[in-house]
Image: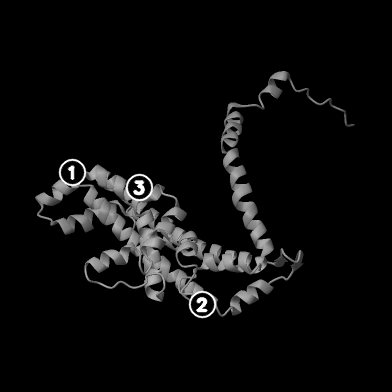
Amino acid sequence: MAQDHPLPSISPDVRRSWWTPARRDHFTGYLFILPQITGLTVFVLAPLALMAWYSLNEWNVLAGTFSFVGLGNYEKLATDPALPGVLWASACFSVGLVLFNLSLALLLAVLLNQKLAGTVVFRTIFFSPVVVSLVAWAIVWRFLLQQDGGINAVLRMLSIDGPNWLRGPTTAMTSVIVVQVVKNVGLNMVLFLAALQNVPQELYEAARVDGASRWTQFFKITVPLISPTVLLTSIITVAGSLQVFAQIAVLTEGGPGTSTTVLVYYLYQQAFQFHFFGYGASLAMLLLLIVGALTYLQWSLRKAWVYDND
């Protein structure tokens, strides 16, 4: 015959043992990351979710209509005749910016890493455009690049007739790239400079003893040891190049024609000038897909060329 057994009573010492040091440490850790999680949710994940939802709807602010269209905006995206030209302009801008920016930043970092007089002054000069207002920077360059602007005035002193830099399809794209490179090259230069100063000098001394030339030292020692920084700067620069907007809006407004209409500026036109917010959201999803794919590709290829200390 079964007998009823009373449940064992939980002593106060056992109840207190639930709040163990390990749980207290976990709770403290969650408190520390709570602001980051909150910010990520409010300012990144929630806007992304809303953007995905808006891309499935057509929202006309002026008419006050909001209707579900499903994949209609993505079908419009696939058949948009202007989109190939926009993607080509974005690709030209990104390739030109990344190649010019990274090569110039590395060259400046190598030169300013020498123990010469005045290097601190030149570091300050090259980095100062980074802290200048982007819009103010673009406005100044718009005046300099006019037909009768400062650039052509200098060229006339050399008996050279300069073009209207912002009105030719090729010169307009080149001008926008150069303006953006000069604006941000100082940031990558500082990152490369920090990486160069962490390369052990003993390696160069050993290479010189073995008779290695400067080019050999650069490609066999310097480049492999700063390759993690090259990866970082390339990811940052590629992602930034695909998000360019203010320079295009101030300098060329996407022209002449659509030669400098990059993806973000085209998104702005569709959403805020033509009031196709749903289609603008689908363009934003396309931009997110491109940035994510390129970042994943760069990160996946790192094992083939990035030096790993481990």
* Percent position of residue 44, x then y: 59, 51
Q: Residue at x 68, y 72 (%)?
A: 71
Name the residue that disc number 2 marks: 84
Q: Tell me the number on the disc at residue 115.
A: 1
Name the residue that disc number 3 marks: 128
Nearest the viewer among 301 and 264 is 264
Q: Amino acid at mark 3?
A: Ser
**Of callouts 2 and 3, which one flags the residue occurring earlier in the amino acid sequence?**
2
Mark nearer the viewer, 2 or 3: 3
* Percent position of residue 42, x then y: 63, 47
Q: Is residue 31 above or below residue 268?
A: above
Label 2 and label 3: CA atoms lie apart by 36 Å
**Of callouts 2 and 1, which one flags the residue occurring earlier in the amino acid sequence?**
2
Q: Secondary structure at mark 2?
A: helix
Nearest the viewer among 291 and 162 is 162
* Percent position of residue 210, x then y: 10, 52
Residues tagged 1 and 3 counted as in contact (Cβ below 8 A): no
Label 2 and label 1: CA atoms lie apart by 49 Å
Q: Secondary structure at mark 1?
A: loop
Q: Residue at x 50, y 67 (%)?
A: 253
Q: Is residue 249 in sight in this rendering?
A: yes
Using a 10 Å C-alpha cutoff, classify the residue at mark 3 as few (fewer than 14 neighbours), some (14 to 19) or many (20 or more).
some
